[in-house]
Amino acid sequence: MIDDAKERLAYLKGLLAGSGTFTEEKLGKAFSTIVEVIEDLVNILDEIDIGDMLEEGDESVFKCPSCGDFIEVDPTKFRGREWIRLGCEKCGEMVLITRST
């Protein structure tokens, strides 16, 4: 789906960068393509599953390098350390998590 959006965006850029004046037909194609790109982006955003929404500052989210699952970490767990080791709940892999600066 992201590839479709990229292709339509490239088409739109080419259409707008093309030579000459803007005819009604050219403007119609441009607007139609803009709407298609926006629809693709909305569909992509609908498919993103990030679980529960996190309030800023409460937790950090890290991605497990083994299974790709998201690991939510309360920043207070660092307690002055630059890194902690946690087990991924999905695959059990021990993950080294460094504090974001």
Image (cartoon, rainbow, N blue to C red):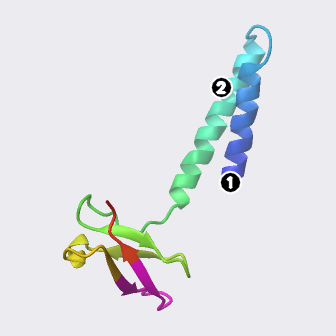
Neighbour tally class for label 1: few under 14, some 14-19, many 20 plus, Cα within 10 Å: few
- Asked whether residue 87 is drawn in magenta, I would say yes
- Identify the element where label 1 is drawn: loop
- Who's the residue at 30% across and 73% down the image? 82
* Count of labels in the image: 2
Left or right: 46 with respect to 85? right
Give the x, y percent position of residue 58. 23, 65
Q: Is residue 43 above or below residue 9?
A: below
- Identify the element where label 2 is drawn: helix
Left or right: 60 with respect to 35? left
| Foreground disc of the pair 1, 2 | 1
Front one among 96 and 91: 96
Give the x, y percent position of residue 92. 47, 92
- Who's the residue at 70% across and 18% down the image? 27
Location of residue 38 (image quadrant): top right
Pointer 2 residue: 31
Measured Cα–Cα span from mark 1 to mark 2: 20 Å
- Who's the residue at 47% across and 87% down the image? 90
Left or right: 101 with respect to 47? left
- The quadrant in which the N terminus is found is bottom right
Amino acid type of the residue tagged 2 in the rendering: Phe
Amino acid type of the residue tagged 1 in the rendering: Met
Residue stretch rendered in magenta on the structure: 85-96
Q: Earlier in the sequence, mark 1 or mark 2?
A: 1
The residue positioned farthest toward the bottom in the image shown = 92
Front one among 85 and 92: 85
Pointer 1 residue: 1
Neighbour tally class for label 2: few under 14, some 14-19, many 20 plus, Cα within 10 Å: few
- Asked whether residue 2 is drawn in magenta, I would say no
